Image (cartoon, grey):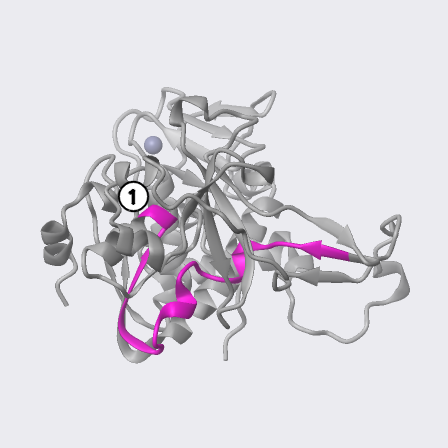
């Protein structure tokens, strides 16, 4: 079995400036920004205008000349003339970048690290860490008829199926509580969806996820990257699996008669999530990616494609600009996702 590569981690650790220099780009730094001629081999049009800019801190780039944009991995792939939709080739580009620039991320066991390689800074308290522990309580008294829910077009059946309800107190006050289960079906936390879109801001995110907490001498952590939403409800392995970014898409697909849907709960598919997605689908089955029609959706599609396509047949369903699965009628979805 080939090793997994954590694309998100790699992207976070790669120094874009180093990568640019590696490809012969003369980096002109202004703060976190670099601006210069477009180095991409497929760039068409003028080479003598500084159409290419990169945010070195965020690891993203775009070119106003040729319209190319993306993250540091996609930049390297374009420089290598690799098709961004070719999962295996993308993976090889990533592995090469990791080998060259971030060898410390290679998690292939190599025996005990030498003393000088061990991390020096120790956490102030070394509490045993428990990740995604099952909850020993359930939220009671959720309002399942709050106007937000029918306002999203959800039927009482769908609301009950996913255990949704408006919460009026605690951490999830003024949010729709969304029960989160691991792949074994254990309740491991609740996400909260703000019901007032107008009030969403930096301190009031659209979605709130469980935080870290300490109890009984243990550190409890929650990581959404270790499971996929709705995965436990499937009678896996299935023939066809639809993968979307968000909760609302899963609810809407369910209500539209497409029950084999899971969500990564964000635009980045982690290595563990990719592994789960593969295990949920028969080797002869298909994975349908249905990204939102925006740049995060593109990223989402690519992160899935790169990791899953070497193992399962995949179909990428393009919904069109700024469209989300929830914008389509049941009939339209059934047509797009005809198996
Ligand atoms: Zn260009």
Residue 82 placed where, x, y %?
Answer: 35, 54
Q: Residue 230's image quarter?
A: bottom left
Comparing 315 with 149, the one in front is 149
The magenta segment is 219-248
Measured from the top left, where is residue 302 in percent x and y? 36, 52
Q: Nearer the viewer, residue 150 or 108?
A: 150
Residue 226: say if magenta. yes
Determine the residue positioned at 53% across, 29% down: 204
Examine the image and state in which quarter residue 108 appears.
bottom right
Please check the rendered image and state whether residue 57 is part of the magenta-colored stretch, yes or no.
no
Q: Name the quadrant containing residue 75.
A: top left
Residue at image x 30%, y 26%?
65
Q: Residue at x 66, y 61 (%)?
A: 131
**Relative vertical location of residue 53 with respect to residue 271 in this rendering, above or below:** above
Picture coordinates of residue 49 (x, y %)?
36, 19
Residue hosting label 1: 292
Q: Nearer the viewer, residue 6 or 176?
A: 176
Return the residue found at the far front: 141
Local secondary structure at mark 1: loop
Q: Quadrant of ligand 1?
A: top left
């Amino acid at each position: 079995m080939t090793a997994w590569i954590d694309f998100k981690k790699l992207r976070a650790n790669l120094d874009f400036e180093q990568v640019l220099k590696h490809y012969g780009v003369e980096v002109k730094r202004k703060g976190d920004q670099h601006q210069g001629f477009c180095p991409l081999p497929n760039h068409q049009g003028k080479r003598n205008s500084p159409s290419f800019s990169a945010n070195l801190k965020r690891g993203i780039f775009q070119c106003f000349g040729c319209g190319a944009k993306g993250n540091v991995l996609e930049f390297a792939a374009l420089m290598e003339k690799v098709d961004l939709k070719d999962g295996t080739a993308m993976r090889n580009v990533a592995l090469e970048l990791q080998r060259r620039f971030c060898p410390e991320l290679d998690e292939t066991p190599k025996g005990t690290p030498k003393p000088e390689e061990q991390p020096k800074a120790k956490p102030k308290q070394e509490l045993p860490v428990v990740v995604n522990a099952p909850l020993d309580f359930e939220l009671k008294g959720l309002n399942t008829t709050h106007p937000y829910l029918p306002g999203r077009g959800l039927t009482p059946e769908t609301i009950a199926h996913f255990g949704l309800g408006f919460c009026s107190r605690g951490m999830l006050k003024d949010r729709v509580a969304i029960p989160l289960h691991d792949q074994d079906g254990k309740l491991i936390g609740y996400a909260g969806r703000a019901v007032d879109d107008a009030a969403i801001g930096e301190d009031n995110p659209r979605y709130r996820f469980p935080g870290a907490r300490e109890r009984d001498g243990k550190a409890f952590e929650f990581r959404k990257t270790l499971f996929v939403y709705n995965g436990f409800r499937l009678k896996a392995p299935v023939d066809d699996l639809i993968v979307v970014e968000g909760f609302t898409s899963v609810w809407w697909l369910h209500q539209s008669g497409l029950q084999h849907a899971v969500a990564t709960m964000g635009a980045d598919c982690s290595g563990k999530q990719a592994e789960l997605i593969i295990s949920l689908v028969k080797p002869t089955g298909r994975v349908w990616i249905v990204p939102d029609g925006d740049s995060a959706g593109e990223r989402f599609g690519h992160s899935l494609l790169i990791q899953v396509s070497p193992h399962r047949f995949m179909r990428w369903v393009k919904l069109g600009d700024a469209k989300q699965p929830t914008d389509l009628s049941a009939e339209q979805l059934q047509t797009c996702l005809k198996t």
